[in-house]
Image (tube, coloured by chain):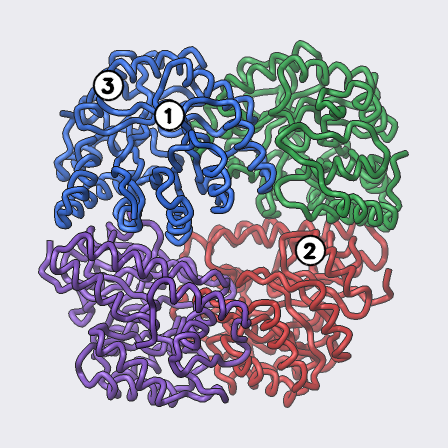
Chain colours: A purple, B blue, C green, D red
Amino acid sequence: MTTRKPSTFVCTITPFDAEARLDDEAAMVLYGRLASAGVGAYVGSSSPGEGYALSLSETERLYGIALAAVDGRVPIRAMGVEPHTPEQLASLIRLAESCHLDAMQLYCLDAGHGNKPNPAELERYFRGLLETMRLPAVLSSHVFNGYVVEPELVDRLLRDYEHVIGINVTNPDIAYVSRIIDVVDGRADVHVGGPMQAVSALALGAQGFLGTEGNLDPSACAAVIEHYRAGNLAETFAAYSKIIRLFSMNVWPGGSMRWLKAAMKVLGLPGWHLRPPWLALDDDAHARIAVQLEALGVTGR
Amino acid sequence: MTTRKPSTFVCTITPFDAEARLDDEAAMVLYGRLASAGVGAYVGSSSPGEGYALSLSETERLYGIALAAVDGRVPIRAMGVEPHTPEQLASLIRLAESCHLDAMQLYCLDAGHGNKPNPAELERYFRGLLETMRLPAVLSSHVFNGYVVEPELVDRLLRDYEHVIGINVTNPDIAYVSRIIDVVDGRADVHVGGPMQAVSALALGAQGFLGTEGNLDPSACAAVIEHYRAGNLAETFAAYSKIIRLFSMNVWPGGSMRWLKAAMKVLGLPGWHLRPPWLALDDDAHARIAVQLEALGVTGR
Amino acid sequence: MTTRKPSTFVCTITPFDAEARLDDEAAMVLYGRLASAGVGAYVGSSSPGEGYALSLSETERLYGIALAAVDGRVPIRAMGVEPHTPEQLASLIRLAESCHLDAMQLYCLDAGHGNKPNPAELERYFRGLLETMRLPAVLSSHVFNGYVVEPELVDRLLRDYEHVIGINVTNPDIAYVSRIIDVVDGRADVHVGGPMQAVSALALGAQGFLGTEGNLDPSACAAVIEHYRAGNLAETFAAYSKIIRLFSMNVWPGGSMRWLKAAMKVLGLPGWHLRPPWLALDDDAHARIAVQLEALGVTGR
Amino acid sequence: MTTRKPSTFVCTITPFDAEARLDDEAAMVLYGRLASAGVGAYVGSSSPGEGYALSLSETERLYGIALAAVDGRVPIRAMGVEPHTPEQLASLIRLAESCHLDAMQLYCLDAGHGNKPNPAELERYFRGLLETMRLPAVLSSHVFNGYVVEPELVDRLLRDYEHVIGINVTNPDIAYVSRIIDVVDGRADVHVGGPMQAVSALALGAQGFLGTEGNLDPSACAAVIEHYRAGNLAETFAAYSKIIRLFSMNVWPGGSMRWLKAAMKVLGLPGWHLRPPWLALDDDAHARIAVQLEALGVTGR
């Protein structure tokens, strides 16, 4: 269907130290692991990256560390956060451009308190951002905040803006994912959000998936893509299966941050502290996670 | 993980004639096509089989036609309907037993008007049915009516009832699907409901999937399983992709019956009438469906 | 706005004895209490009346007892159940007509398994039932099963069928309730389902509310209407407040049957048994309910 | 139940001029109208106040105008916005304190992207804010972002912080509203969010309601409270009915801003422009609103 190269990206946590300060050394370890495994990174995300809690200068520092750690081996992209106003995301875009990241994802507007742009307003929002940026852009269509970006809008934006290089689609409705893949038609990369639909999306012609599991086991994420490219069904499915079992360990509601950082602590990975008001999972949870990670063969190496 | 044989089943429509009578000849055609393609059938379903509109004697006739048409080439199972009371499903179980179907699925209780059994009551319900039946049974865990059957209950029922030969899991949460596969642990077949998670489920160790698309293109459904068994990644994915594109054609809300029967009419397959109060899709819809089926290469042969 | 008389109706439980048989004497007590308090009754409901578990002959017996117990003092209406097919509700209509009940409510179709009629099919359903019945009819627009009956359809049915004497509206959206009241415009009674919006609906021009609380305290329900008719604000609000506090005692999910019957047992009212698979609440729940009922001053007299 | 004085507050829009600048004169008109009608105001809200689009200095200017316009006749409170981090709300608290507003509402955290604090984290969040503020505080329990603040937490915060003078409860579940009223038990004012439950809440012992309708017709909002205090049932209900019919005019999804500002334009009130990316409703909508406002007797005087 297309000759675009399959790939996967990790939506990275942001490492903090015991005083909840940005932990530069832990960030070097994190992004170094990803580069060694050969998977790209999305940096500074609203989740699990605690991106809203980062000042612009901290985000800038984090971008710099990520770029330095991977040293060109894998792409480093800005994830951005869902902004309350276009101006809030524009600030992050300017920052990503000045740091020379590889690309920047553009979330839909999180207008807050039940407010939601109608299709015309959403198009106005995206065009306003795309007109003023030079960095390669990746559109986001994410079911959070109730967004199902119309395939026709994706088509129009792809026609009008050559620097749109991808779209990240997070939607449990595989029919919608299929429609997006068809409308994009090879003009940009399509990645699904989360590992849930990873093999389904590859089967439908997408380039791959995003996920948080690579914060813990980047090699398993890379393996899905590598075996798929080699045409090895059994190995592709086995790698996918490992990631889903890792994904399924998180039974704590309200986001993946607490679970991911608990698992990092269990694995001996640095930077597992959370910023207030978030609280770490309790000791029982850590013990349970330790047993599960061992059973699945996930280590911090 | 298991040596259970992969498979797929079609949740069949019920063919009616122009006077909304059960259409025996059309049923022969339908089940004959499935047998030729090598896929089993679930018969008399609440959806898309309009099962609630069938009298017990009509259901008995339909069971008989299905068995005669396939003549042992593929399994014929009773799908049942979500009953309002245990007694309603017990009547269907007795019928399926007397007709010597291959198995019977047991839906959860649809208690109506927001009533829902708690876990203890649901267990009481399943045990009450399983105690009195001799036919092989397939449990259902379906997100409709809000059910997420606890993995622990599935485990207990598998321990206590040897005639539970399968579980059909319909839930968009792949983590839950994964937990069910793990708790079943090869003691029964696991099929996911709908084609959405077909390859994901195979990757996780399930035996396959159910779907309605086989009413139109049974060979494509069979192809997913055959290529998977042969270890052919590209062909497995291509067959899956075709089914999802077929699945994605249905953009009419409120169930798949109207769309399936419109597509049957377009393909020249008999039995495409609906029972009141259901109304056929309009001419524009049929024209649109015709174009899409042709583009996808789906025919009535 | 209208000179229609305000009123309230109790959606009654169905009393069973210790062997889960219909308890005729308990039913006499129940309907006698309602008549003494001056409130009408809806009989044989899907909830909390366990209506799906009643055979047609049991329903007929229950209708007869209710009529005999109230002896013309208050209206006795058939509530019906959400049917899977129009024919199922037609059977109940025939029964209500032969028993000479005062009216029959027509629920929307519960087509099962995610099937849902579109607006044209829903109109076809209602017209099919209304054409063949002579008993006064009450339309239902209930948010369960996802129904928000279009105000325009209500208008058309009121124009075409003189025997539509009321509409029961159960929808948390007060704007929708307001639109229904406006479109009905005094041509029929409007009651809201449940006590939640009782005073809001009266304020907007509806005739009153339905509720299950009258199974326990029919006088409090009657008091809301009586004080409202007398123009006594403080007493109207006090009676409403008592009902809402009674309503708020039910913290057990999955319907009100278990809680209502537990409260009946606590109050010494007969008929508090449930039919399988339903299980009675545990002793702790009964003890808690006893304390709450005493604090609120609710007794079985 | 309590001797607390009933009241209502208007959640105010923020007036902008044709260039989308804060419109000081229009703000004087807006807050002057409220003061004349005798209703208090919440200022700078996320909705409908476009609060996220205001810089801190603009918010400060708006606070000042509101205080000057009402000149002590009615209370002026900061509404705040749902913050992504505690620090974001702390900035607004500092501002409200320095401007000497009458009180400040504390929204729950909008952690973004599906993240949500658990009960312990939510308590940590509220305590962190309450510890550092001296201004009277009003807690918010709002169903948006999925919050149902536990009654026990409300109780603990009321015990520990004397400067909590109120709680604003926005939840369609009247049982929950009732539980909050009971746990507060006269220690603070309880207002429900929106006019939907205005009379229900008064009946249950709350002090009143918040709403946006007072941006258009502040006298009608005041009338509900005045007539309720005078014990006039018919007039209380008539005023409530007018507000609900005004509320029900908004049939445009995605928030109330567009509708409110369109109605302001129709009524000849200044400041009806929106900030990008929001777009004004079209001419047909304005024409429809004009007819409806005239029919309801709402004017800009």
* Mark 2 element type: helix
Q: Seen from this angle, which residue lies furthest left?
A: A3
Q: Chain of mark 1?
A: B
Q: Seen from this angle, which residue lies furthest right?
A: C301
Closer mark to the observer between disc 2 and disc 1: 1
Q: Is residue C64 left or right of residue D23?
A: right
- Among numbered discs 3 and 1, the one appearing first in the sequence: 3
Closer mark to the observer between disc 3 and disc 1: 1
Q: Are marks 2 and 3 in contact (CB under 8 Å)?
A: no
Task: Give the residue type that dot 2 points to.
Answer: Tyr
Q: Are marks 3 and 1 on the same chain?
A: yes
Q: Are marks 2 and 3 on the same chain?
A: no
Write down the quadrant of residue B195 in the picture.
top left
Q: Which mark is residue B103?
A: 1
Q: Is residue A160 left or right of residue A61?
A: left
- If the image is split into quadrants, where does the N terminus of chain D sit? bottom right
| Residue D67 at x, y percent in the picture | 66, 82
Name the residue that disc number 3 marks.
B70
Q: Is residue D15 left or right of residue A162?
A: right
